[in-house]
RNA sequence: GGGCGAGUGGCGGAACGGCAGACGCGCCAGCUUUAGGAGCUGGUGUCGCAAGACGUGCGAGUUCGAAUCUCGCCUCGCCCACCA
């Protein structure tokens, strides 16, 4: 063979860029607002951190495969892309390098756009949004005003978590772990009191717990449920007792102390009360003889929450205030303590201490020698006395509980709550762990909060016509702890929208999670200058059909976005209840050493280098093949070689000039028959008769067409379920089957069908090579606009099925039978098998279990 | 401490309660090549010459049949962590 006849080697660099340019020029992936069959596929937009890394490739490739398949099935797919570009990293990077955050962010975006484009993903770039663009944050500000007008944005003095390193206020969700560290830099967080803007997410706490109709991963739902933390119980008022009060306190002037409990049934066992050290009543309750110690304890508790609570086995400490309250059902006086295990922000910041039935109260009572009264016991038994007994089902009954004695604990909860309500001492109550969302940041690189402060009219919203409130460029953003906007006179100066008086502009900017809570709405009409989104487009596209991204956003971004949609729905701005119908999380790509990729470990793979070496298709395919998409997996330098070889085999198989791998001429005429082309030759066919040859070809055809149609069905299903790794393995099997058919014999038509199908099925995963080969085979442009193949069930069905035959559950033989063979016949054949007979060894079968089409099990043991 | 998830060849991983290990990597042998590499063909769970036996973290259980379901334990990962 001469060099010119040798198949051209696969070289992606000769065609990948060409096709990407062509697709973009032809707007192949443009999503049109008026088309039927809308399918909105969204991937979490990237932060503009610098470079596109392999994790971005991984997160993007899966959804792209799905988008491409849906398009080929005739749906109108929107797969948008944008950048989350406000936020702390930009500001910190800017401080480090002494450049402006915008001069760090925008070149990053420029570079990332180029890098993202090298993936060949089918994004509709015409819809790109950048959250730090005034055209975008203008509408973020507009949304703030809508929330403000609806009473969902408010300002309040609050102790806030403050990261001393980043010099920034953190949202509650951004403080991690028992030792309360900054989510970004891991520095222990401290507390500060500041006026802060909040969004009233707690108003929607109950509705946010309703996940009906949402196809989300169960662990994410669980995390949101836990985060919202709804508890049902009762609030109960404990009057402050006159006795024990020393001079300086005036119990008659004190309102009752309200507690929250999930166990009102245990109230007869409440032998003390505990208030959070920060509780407002503490200074007034404390008796003079206890004041010095109490104040010292309060100060220590404040310091403790400020610094760290590292000790996992913290001692449960407290301090007696000197005051007493009255248990409203026993009328017994109970001492009032303060302790730092009672949290100021949860429930009412006060509890009734029931040591017999709460582990924390038990520890506390033991430490301070407080009485322990058992009021719940297992039916007919004594409860354990060396620990708190916390069970409260229908199997436990109330004891020592006055008129409620004998009720089950579950009944007691209802009865005692009702009794308290009748007497005006409290009643049923629900409390939540979730707090309102702190959205203000004393930072520069974010959307300014559109509020001005007038000396006459107070806080006033900036009129919508004056939006955006532009972020000034010329600021000094040294890390001082106060917003750099506070020293910018030009920015600060404003006029009151009510009376025109001089006013001072709000200098806080918004949490970047505000920006990302609505970007999926902006994608529907990103250039609209008159509204945040076009109502028609919103109705057409939303809610998002499938949202993909990392599981790390389980409670931050995903909860905020749900809150936004519910609030906007109530204001009449959107027409749906939930932003994301279905959610899927991809896993993480690890280094080849199974560790997280990091520069310090030296296990980072650079996508740009890989593109240069293997081309985009090979990287895409390897990432899909590496393992289940929702689990991620380790990078493998040799694994990518395997995928690269697969594409090279496809390349050779699909070349119109090189229909088989060895380069043999693919035609053969059979004497006495009309001339007929086959691909490949029958091994040792020198003496083969024409009839045998034809029979071999027909058999090969059936096998190949079966493989082709089985692959269509399997790959379609796997792609749809995001099981990309098994889909790719089935494409490899089809390519192996084609190579097999070429050596064993099959008709040209069957081979053509198989190769064309392979290219169509491969197109979503490896779009460039599929397009290139499609063109080389003389097919019409573009492979990505072809109809998705449909499996022919009859062709996919097997002529013969293999049935495993077990004896007592162990595999002993296999039967080859036609699919329609009767059960009786199968049983006869199975029992007739020599190997089965050998294992039966004369024992009679007790019974024969047959699973049609699956197996035969001959059971000998009696049972 | 609590919750959730996962443990399958040398490696990544397949397997509606029904043939464990698809597909790929790696490895072995052969063909090809001046050589290297690439490519092609075959083999490759463990033990055993073989027949065969044993095999999905460990131990029980349910079932004709368990990687898969149940219970207990071990290990790893993630999330939450005084929420009354």
Image (cartoon, coloured by chain):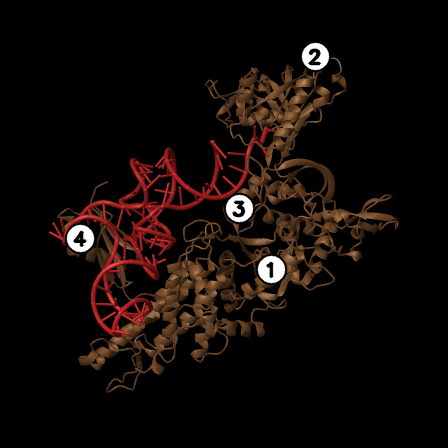
Chain colours: A brown, B red
Label annotation for residue A220: 3
Label annotation for residue A836: 4
Q: Does mark 3 fall on the same chain as mark 4?
A: yes
Kindly report which numbered mark, 4 or 3, lies closer to the viewer in this rendering. 3
Q: Chain of mark 2?
A: A
Describe residue A280's horizontal placement relative to residue A770 as left or right: right
Kindly report which numbered mark, 1 or 2, lies closer to the viewer in this rendering. 1
How many residues crowd around disc 1 within 10 Å: few (fewer than 14), some, or many (20 or more)?
some
The residue beneath circle 1 is A108
Identify which residue is drawn at 50% across, 71% down: A784
**Residue A797 x %, y %:** 34, 65
Q: Residue furthest front?
A: A98
Q: Where, by quadrant of the figure, is residue A179 drawn?
A: top right
Q: Chain of mark 1?
A: A
Which residue is more in the foreground, A463 or A146? Answer: A463
Is residue A796 in view? no
The image shows residue A250, relative to residue A709, as above or below, that is above
Which residue is more in the foreground, A398 or A649? Answer: A649
The residue beneath circle 2 is A243
Kindly report which numbered mark, 4 or 2, lies closer to the viewer in this rendering. 2
How many residues crowd around disc 2 within 10 Å: few (fewer than 14), some, or many (20 or more)?
few
Are the residues flagged by discs 2 and 3 in contact, CB closer than 8 Å?
no
Identify which residue is drawn at 63% across, 36% down: A190
Which one is earlier in the sequence, the residue at label 4 or at label 2? 2
Which one is earlier in the sequence, the residue at label 2 or at label 3? 3
Kindly report which numbered mark, 3 or 1, lies closer to the viewer in this rendering. 1
How many residues crowd around disc 4 within 10 Å: few (fewer than 14), some, or many (20 or more)?
some
């Amino acid at each position: 063979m001469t060099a010119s006849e040798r198949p051209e080697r696969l070289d992606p660099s000769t065609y990948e860029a060409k096709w990407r340019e062509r697709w973009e020029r032809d707007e192949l992936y443009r999503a049109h607002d008026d088309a039927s069959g809308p399918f909105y596929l969204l991937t979490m937009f990237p932060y503009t951190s610098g470079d596109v890394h392999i994790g971005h490739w991984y997160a993007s490739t899966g959804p792209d495969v799905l988008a491409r398949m849906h398009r080929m099935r005739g749906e109108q797919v929107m797969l948008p892309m944008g950048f989350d570009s406000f936020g702390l990293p930009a500001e910190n990077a800017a401080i480090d390098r002494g450049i402006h955050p915008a001069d760090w962010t925008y070149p990053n975006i420029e570079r990332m756009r180029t890098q993202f484009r090298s993936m060949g993903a089918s994004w509709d770039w015409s819809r790109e949004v950048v959250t730090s663009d005034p055209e975008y944050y203008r509408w973020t500000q507009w949304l703030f005003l809508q929330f403000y007008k609806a009473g969902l944005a408010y300002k309040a003095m609050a102790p806030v978590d403050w990261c001393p390193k980043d010099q920034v206020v953190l949202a509650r969700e951004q403080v991690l772990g028992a030792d309360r560290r900054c989510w970004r830099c891991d520095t222990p967080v401290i507390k500060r009191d500041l006026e802060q803007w909040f969004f009233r997410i707690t108003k929607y706490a109950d509705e946010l717990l309703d996940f009906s109709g949402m196809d989300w991963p169960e662990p994410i739902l669980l995390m949101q449920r836990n985060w919202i933390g709804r508890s049902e119980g009762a609030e109960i008022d404990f009057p402050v007792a006159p006795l024990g009060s020393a001079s300086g306190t005036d119990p008659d002037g004190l309102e009752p102390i309200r507690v929250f409990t999930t166990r009102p049934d245990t109230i007869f066992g409440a032998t003390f009360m505990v208030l959070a050290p920060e509780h407002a009543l503490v200074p007034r309750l404390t008796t003079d003889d206890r004041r010095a110690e109490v104040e010292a304890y309060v100060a220590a508790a404040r310091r403790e929450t400020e610094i760290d609570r590292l000790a996992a086995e913290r001692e449960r400490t407290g301090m007696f205030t000197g005051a007493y309250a009255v248990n409203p059902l026993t009328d017994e006086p109970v001492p009032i303590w303060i302790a730092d295990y009672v949290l100021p922000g949860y429930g009412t910041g006060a509890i009734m201490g029931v040591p017999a039935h709460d582990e924390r109260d038990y520890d506390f009572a033991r430490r301070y020698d407080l009485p322990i009264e058992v009021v719940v016991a297992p039916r007919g038994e004594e409860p354990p006395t060396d620990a708190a007994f916390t069970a409260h089902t229908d199997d436990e009954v109330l004891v020592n509980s006055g008129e409620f004695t004998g009720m089950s604990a579950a009944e007691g909860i209802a009865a005692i709550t009702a009794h308290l309500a009748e007497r005006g001492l409290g009643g049923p109550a629900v409390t939540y762990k979730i707090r309102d969302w702190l959205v203000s940041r004393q930072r520069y690189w974010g959307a300014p909060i559109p509020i001005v402060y007038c000396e006459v009219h107070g806080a006033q919203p900036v009129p919508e016509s004056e939006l955006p409130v532009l972020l000034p460029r010329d600021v000094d953003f040294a890390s001082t702890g106060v917003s750099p906007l506070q020293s910018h006179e030009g920015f600060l100066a404003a006029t009151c929208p009510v009376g025109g008086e001089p006013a001072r502009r709000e200098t806080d900017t918004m949490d970047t999670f505000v920006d990302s809570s609505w970007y999926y709405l902006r994608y529907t009409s990103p250039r609209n200058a008159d509204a945040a989104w076009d109502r028609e487009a919103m109705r057409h596209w939303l809610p998002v059909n499938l949202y993909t991204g990392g599981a790390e956003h389980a409670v931050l971004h995903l909860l905020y976005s749900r809150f936004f949609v519910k609030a906007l729905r109530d204001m009449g701005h959107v027409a749906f209840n939930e932003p994301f119908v279905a959610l899927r999380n991809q896993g993480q790509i690890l280094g080849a050493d199974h560790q997280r990729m990091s520069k310090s470990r030296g296990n980072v793979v650079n996508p740009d280098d890989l593109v240069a070496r293997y081309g985009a298709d090979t990287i895409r395919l390897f990432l899909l093949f590496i393992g289940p998409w929702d689990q991620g997996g380790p990078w493998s330098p040799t694994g990518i070689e395997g995928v690269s070889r697969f594409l090279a085999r496809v390349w050779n198989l699909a070349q119109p000039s090189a229909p088989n791998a060895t380069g043999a001429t693919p035609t053969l005429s059979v004497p006495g028959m009309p001339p007929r082309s086959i691909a490949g030759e029958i091994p040792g066919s020198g003496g083969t008769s024409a009839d045998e040859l034809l029979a071999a070809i027909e058999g090969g055809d059936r096998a190949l067409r079966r493989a082709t149609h089985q692959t269509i069905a399997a790959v379609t299903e796997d792609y749809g379920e995001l099981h990309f790794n098994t889909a790719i393995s089935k494409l490899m099997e089809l390519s192996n089957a084609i190579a097999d058919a070429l050596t064993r014999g099959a008709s040209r038509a069957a081979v053509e069908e198989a190769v064309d199908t392979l290219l169509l099925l491969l197109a979503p995963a490896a779009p460039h090579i599929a397009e290139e080969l499609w063109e080389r085979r003389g097919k019409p442009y573009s492979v990505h606009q072809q109809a998705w193949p449909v499996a022919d069930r009859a062709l996919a069905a097997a002529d013969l099925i293999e049935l495993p035959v077990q004896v007592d559950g162990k595999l002993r033989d296999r039967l080859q039978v036609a699919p329609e063979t009767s059960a009786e016949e199968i049983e006869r054949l199975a029992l007739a098998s020599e190997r089965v007979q050998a294992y039966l060894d004369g024992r009679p079968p007790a019974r024969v279990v047959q699973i049609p089409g699956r197996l035969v099990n001959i059971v000998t043991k009696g049972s």
